[in-house]
Image (cartoon, grey):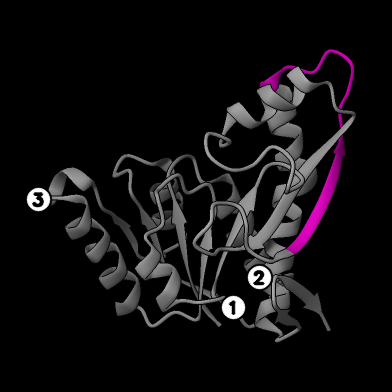
Amino acid sequence: MKIAVLVSGGGTNLQAIIDKIASGEIQNTEISVVVSNNRKAYALERAKAANIPAVGLSVKQYPDREAFYDAVIETIDSYQVDLIVLAGCLMYIPPKLIQKYHNRIINIHPSLIPSFCGKGYYGLAVHEKVLERGVKVTGATVHFVDEILDNGPILLQKPVLIEDGDTPEALQLRVMQQAEWIILPQAINLLAQGKVVIEGNKARII
């Protein structure tokens, strides 16, 4: 299975994927390209270090957002990938990309959807809201991407306990270590082995 990984920042989830392909925990999978909407994203350096094609595209390079989105789609298309993985990607995903790759885009979200998701819930803001609300358990979710933000079929979830004295930064790191870096590679491996069936708004592992 050939995948494109879309990133915006440091690329820690990308690194988890790279490492677990190398270790054999993710089988029958290669990262064909890493694409970022931030040309200075450290994730691009991680890709280059692993000899993976890395493409940084900025909306400022194009006359308007539509032209930028077209360039992103053309870049992904040119690598003929089977799956798109959003790994810390803060870019708006245009409907035409979602439709073209229907049920072939997955995202990692740093909470247990449907809690703490949707508009404005990304990055550190998610963990700030979690702590403000005083919940006892948070976690991460891998889901398929549809036209509604954080709405598509849920593939995997992993809980993480809130600890006394947690800061948003400490919680963010623990959710990455205990959930994100585990279930995103697992999800890719399940898809690579053909073990996922989507029925309506539910994803079933077979």
Going by the numbered disc 1, the residue's amino acid type is: Thr
User: Is 83 placed left or right of 155 in the picture?
Assistant: left
- Residue 43 is inside the magenta segment: no
Q: Measuring 67% from the left and 22% from the top, which residue is drawn there? A: 128
Region in magenta: 155-168
Q: Residue at x 68, y 66 (%)?
A: 153
Please report whichever mark, 1 or 3, sits nearer to the chain's N-terminal start: 1
Pointer 3 local density, CA inside 10 Å: few below 14, some 14–19, many at least 20: few
Label 1 to label 2: alpha-carbon separation: 8 Å
Q: Is 160 within the magenta?
A: yes
Q: Which structural element holds mark 1?
A: loop
Farthest left residue in view:
63
Q: Position of residue 105 (x, y in %)?
A: 53, 68
- At 69% across and 37% down in the image, what residue appears? 116
85 shown above or below 81: above
Three-letter amino acid code at disc 3? Answer: Pro
Horizontal and vertical percent position of residue 174: 76, 34
Disc 1 target residue = 29
Which residue, given by chain and number where applicable, does mark 3 sit on?
63
Q: Which residue matches tag 2? A: 188
How far from the left and from the top, in percent, is residue 99?
43, 74
Mark 2 Cα-neighbour bin, 10 Å: few <14, some 14–19, many ≥20: many
